[in-house]
Image (spheres, rainbow, N blue to C red):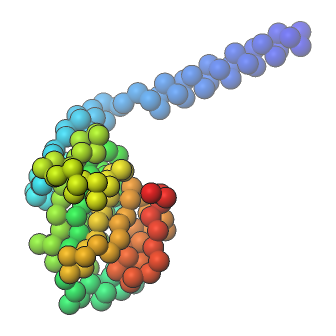
Amino acid sequence: MKKLRKYFSITLLIAGLSFIYANECQPSLQDENSLEEQETILLGELKLSDIEDFEWYKENFNSYKPDISIVESISKKAKNRDLKIEIYFGTWCPDSQREVPRLIKLLEISNFNMNNVKLIGLDRDKIVPNLTEKKAKELDIQMVPTFVFYEDNTYLNRFVEFAVKTLEDDVLSILSDEDYQHSYKF
């Protein structure tokens, strides 16, 4: 009887886990558009209008609520500085789909000069289109998204894939010339 109970418990556990896994991994009907969007790969230099109609862009842009006190600090730090940001990302990448719209919103509400923001779409191999091998090696884009910050055309720092604290904290650290280290050790 004990063996039967043990066998029944294990079978029930496996069946339950299989059901949960099957439901988690199967796209719902409402996810079909986002799966198609994930497969849309835009390459090279892009305009904001190229991505802002994607559902993932709208959802992440609208749902992001940055800390307003940090936004004000970013605005002050960015004011009267020749700052540029290059955003290397993949339209196919969930991390890019989350962080790029959030960064755009953060920059817009910080009154950052959006003419100084460059969007560059990458493929799954993270190859930056139209770059010399030397420049690609200097950029060293290993993960997406990667946000590269420059001041007076000199490299400041980079944000890679996800925030160490929060996106707005990390951007403020970079603009404050703090000893910011992104999430990876490369």
Whether residue 147 is situated above or below residue 24 in the rendered picture: below
Residue 100 visible, this angle: no
Name the residue rendered at 89%, 9% in the picture: 1
The quadrant of the rendering that contains the C terminus is bottom left
- Which residue sits furthest right? 2
Name the residue rendered at 39%, 55% in the picture: 161
Number of numbered discs overlaid on the protein picture: 0
Q: Left or right of 97: which side holds 170? A: right
Location of residue 13 by image quarter: top right
Name the residue rendered at 22%, 86% in the picture: 81
Name the residue rendered at 82%, 15% in the picture: 5
Q: Left or right of 65: which side holds 92? A: left
Location of residue 27 by image quarter: top left
Residue 177 image offset from top left, x and y in percent: 39, 82
Q: Left or right of 176: which side holds 130? A: left
Residue 124 image offset from top left, x and y in percent: 28, 39
Residue 184 image offset from top left, x and y in percent: 47, 57
- Which residue sits furthest front? 134
